[in-house]
Each structure stands twice: as C-alpha cells, then as structure tokens.
Image (cartoon, grey):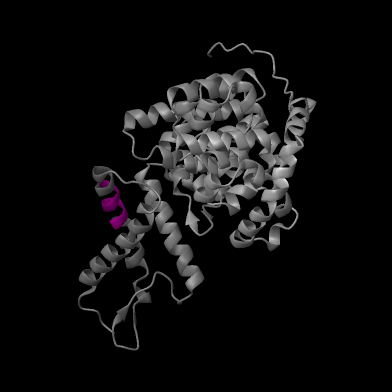
Amino acid sequence: MEITNKNDFIDVYVLGTLNEIKNTVKQNIKLKSELEKQTDEKMKLVLKDLINSNFKNLQINTQGNLIYTLLPIVDERENKKVRTSLVLYYTALYYDNVDLLQQMLDANVKFEKNYLLRLQYLDKSISSKFDTKDYIEKIKRFGEIFVNFDKSIKNLSDEEKEKYSQKFSSLFKLKYREMCKRQKEYKGYSEYMLENLFVKGNLDTFEYNTYKYADNKQLELINFCNGHQYNEATTAKLNYLIQNTNFSNRLEDFDLMASIYSDYELAKLDYDASCFLSYYSETPKMLQKAIEFIELKPEMAFYVKHYVSKEKFMKTSNYVLIETMNQVSKHYLMCNEHNVELLSRIMVPKVTLKRIFGAYKQNNAQEQSDPSLTKKLKPPRNTENK
C-alpha cells in the first residue's frame, strides 16, 4: 500500500514518541527548559532516522488505522526494552553523557529497580567527579546512594549542585572501603544499605569530621536522620557525640530529646521511648508525665503508646499504666484498646496496696543502682577539619 502522507505521519509519530519519552524522564529528573529544547531537537533526528529505516513496519489495524512500531512484530517485552532504551538515550543526550551510558550498558548496569528507572546514574555533574571505571563499580554497589543524593539536590542552582556534588564525592570516597566491608557483612538486608547517608539535608547537618569518625552504628544513625533539619543546639550536640563518643542511638524527634536529656541520658534512651515521649508531648504537663513514666518503666513505653490514647494517658496514673502493661506484654496479640482499659481498672486496687507497702520506692532504688545503666563513652578524638 502506498503512503501519500508519509512525512506528516512520521512527524506526528516522532512528536508522540518524544512526549512519551519525556514523560518518563520527567518522573525521574528535573529538566531545565533551554537544555530540554536542545535535547528535543537531537532526539527528533534520532527518532526520524529510526522510523525511516524501519518504515516497512507500518501496518493497518482492525479499525483501518495506520499503526507503526519500531519492531517488525508486536512483542510487549521487546517494545518495553525499546522504550526504555529511548528514555536512557534521551537522558544521556540531556546530560551529555552518551559515552558513560554505553560503558554502563557494556558493564551490565541495571537501570531499572522496583519498576523505576535510575536515570540519575547519568548525571554528569556527579559522574564526572569519579573515574569512569570506578564510578560504574560504585553504582553497581551503591546505586541507591547516588540516586537519593541526586534527588535531594535536583532543585538547586548549578553552582549549589556543584558544591554539594564535590562534598558528596569527597565523603563517598572517604567511607567507600568501610561501606563495602559493611555491605558484605549485611548482604541482602536493605536496612543496612545506607541509602540516605549523603542526602543534602545530612550534608548540611553533619560535618566532615562527623562522617570521618563515624563507625558502622553511627553511619546508621546519620542514615536514619534522612536529611532532617535540626535546630542549632541539636545539630551541634549530634556532631559532638558522633565525633567524640560511641553514641549511635536512633531516636525520634532529636530536638525534643536533646532538650530533655543530657548526653549521658540520651545514650541510655531507646527508639521506642523516644517515640513515646514525642507522642505524649502535646502539652508541658503531658510531657512531664511521660518523662516520669520513662524514668519508672521505659521498656513498657511501646505498649502504652500502642494502646492508650492521650486522653486516657492523662487520666491514668503511671503506676496503673505500668501494672496494666506488665499484663499486656504477656498477652500482646490478644489485647485491644477496650480490654486494656478494663484491665487498667482492675489494676487500681493492686497499685494502691503496693503503694501502701512501699514496693515502688524499693523497685525504683534497685533500678537506679543497676550497673547496666552505666555507659562508657569513647575518648575525645582529634576533631581538626580536613
């Protein structure tokens, strides 16, 4: 069949295909207007060449409309591979990094993970900070670290991006061997992959020496912070503790915890207790009651937060809560908010008797003298900046 409007058809097909490609690209990276236009023109030429060399694939569908595919057969898996290749090529053109794309494909780098394309691998502002061979090796090992860093700086100016890219590459190289050793130790556990270790927020919060002196557990802590911005006092405290002690506790609401506790007390606090304090901090009175509860029975914080509303928390004495949660912890899977409330009413007489006989004072004295609460801190390190 002779096609009389071949050129018009090709132009329409090119524009439609280009828009599909860009929709996928824009889901992953932010395009700058002028550079986007330049890349569009380059990609149009590529698509036209592909179409002209394969125009025999023009077909008529059952409705009598023209259908064109870049492949001679309709195979969804192969078509997806072609579309993905076009997206990767557009991104490489945009970043002026086609050679890197070719070398990464030759090295069998996987760009797709969890149904998303890792187009950030091709960002030349980052890849140029590494030797190409080393960069590909690092991408294979820690691709998510690069992706998350790139996402965290996508809205910055070129000047700011360059500043953070330099800092990122310096710290990444500094900790690379340690991260490889850690990855081998925790192979298969994404929790320990440190995906957010170098996101912009963390680079703003943590100093060079903090990263330099951080051990494995402390790297987990930095990763856990996930770019959160803390107030000035908390930021200073976190940097000091990581640089000079073995502090590595991952806590909820560091600003609040640092305002309540000393360095030594923070070292004894666990995550569930910090979540408990953050949740019951709506008013100063509520927070004070929560602090007193943690001093009495921190291991029961998880159960209280799970089963006791803020209103009920304020109406129930801490000792009743403790006795109730002692029972709840033994039958956790069978409890709900309603039967926990009934159980707390039953515990009131028991608490009254224990108070009369001074049982709580005796227990508190034993806990305060427990040697397990003693925490040795590491000696101060040399904190001179590089």
Viewer-proximal residue among 290 and 14:
290
Q: Position of residue 228 (x, y in %)?
A: 46, 35
- Residue 189 in the image: state x and y as whole percent: 67, 48
Numbered disc total: 0
Q: Quadrant of residue 229?
A: top left
In this rendering, the answer to whether 299 lies above or below 108 is: above
Give the image quarter of residue 166. top left
* Quadrant for the N terminus in the image: bottom left
Q: Is residue 347 magenta?
A: no
Q: Residue at x 38, y 32 (%)?
A: 161
Q: Of helix, strand and loop, which mostly describes the magenta segment? A: helix
Q: Is residue 190 visible?
A: no
Question: What residue sits 28% from the left and 83% below the top?
Answer: 65
Vertical comparison of 355 with 375: above or below: below
Which residues fall within the magenta stretch?
Answer: 38-44
Kindly identify the residue that appears in the image at 69 percent across and 36 percent down: 182
Percent across and percent down for residue 185 are: 73, 40
Image point (56%, 38%), residue name:
290
In the displayed structure, does residue 371 sit left or right of residue 65?
A: right
In the picture provided, is 355 more to the left or to the right than 250?
A: right
Can residue 142 be seen from the camera position used here?
A: yes
The quadrant holding residue 62 is: bottom left
List x then y, in percent, for residue 151.
42, 42
| 221 left or right of 287 in image | right
